[in-house]
Image (spheres, rainbow, N blue to C red):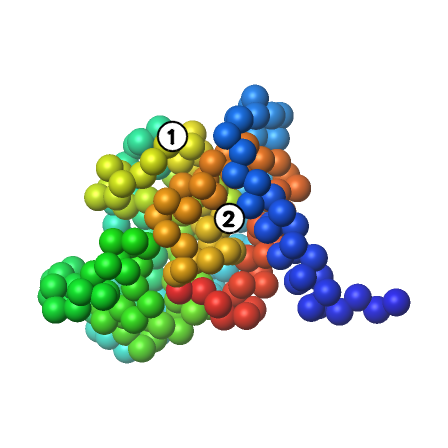
Amino acid sequence: MTLHYSDIENQVDALVAEVGTQFPTARNTPSFYRSILKRPLDILLLVLTAPISVPLILSLALFIWLRTGASPFYTQERIGMGGRVFTMVKLRTMVKDADQRLATFLEENPHAKAEWQRTQKLKDDPRITRTGRILRKTSMDELPQLWNVLIGDMSLVGPRPMMVNQKNMYPGRDYYELRPGLTGFWQVSERNDCSFATRAAHDASYNSNVSITTDLAVIAATVAVVLRGTGY
């Protein structure tokens, strides 16, 4: 019997959904994988994918620079494990005056302001460039975060990196017990339709289910998200 890609995709989605909807409150004691193997696995996968990821990042950076004349990389402070602040790197997807444009847009659009307050994201974000929309749809704007994984700020799988000004909004402590992830339960689930509180529930679920099986399932599901272009 031939196993088609769609069958694999459905199996991966079902596995992640099963784990991600448990939202248990009890935390597992640190496992061998979590405390010993998770970090080396991150490094191994980075090394194995570097011949593809590094040229791709450099090519996209050059394209962005040629299109905009601005720095192709965007940095922002995020909260890491234990509450430590680190500098996260992404490919630029926004206009130069992004913060001011967002403030003006939210002030003039109450519905957008309510959406931002609920999810900390906008489906119709006026800051995003045309190239940026493509990068976000394919999640390729996140690729420079591989550097953050390499230096230990992040992990391949973990909670969505939280902005510093979101700290007081976050319920619970699960986020602070984990390295933020390049991908994770949130990234392969509702994304734009997910409230900030639900993000915290995803973090609690992942914190209680950290294992090599879970991480590999999330990575496989991330590939499906990228191929479907359902990012952003």
Structural distance between the alpha carbons of marks 2 and 1: 17 Å
Q: Residue at x 59, y 63 (%)?
A: 224
| Disc 2 residue crowd, few under 14, some 14–19, many 20+, Cα 10 Å | many
Mark 2: secondary structure: loop
Residue 46's x, y, as percent?
Answer: 53, 48
Whether residue 96 is visible:
no
Q: Residue at x 28, y 60 (%)?
A: 115
> Of 70 and 224, which appears nearest the observer?
224
For residue 179, which quarter of the picture? top left
Going by the numbered disc 2, the residue's amino acid type is Phe
Q: Is residue 189 left or right of residue 169?
A: right
Q: Residue at x 40, y 64 (%)?
A: 232
Q: Is residue 215 left or right of residue 193?
A: right
* Residue assigned mark 2: 185
For residue 70, which quarter of the picture? bottom left
Q: Is residue 124 left or right of residue 106?
A: right
> Of 197 and 80, which appears nearest the observer?
197
Mark 1: secondary structure: loop
Q: Which mark is residue 63?
A: none
Residue 102's x, y, as percent?
Answer: 17, 63
Residue 92's x, y, as percent?
Answer: 29, 64
Going by the numbered disc 1, the residue's amino acid type is Arg
Q: From this viewpoint, which residue is outermost toward the right? A: 1
> Of 77 and 69, which appears nearest the observer?
77
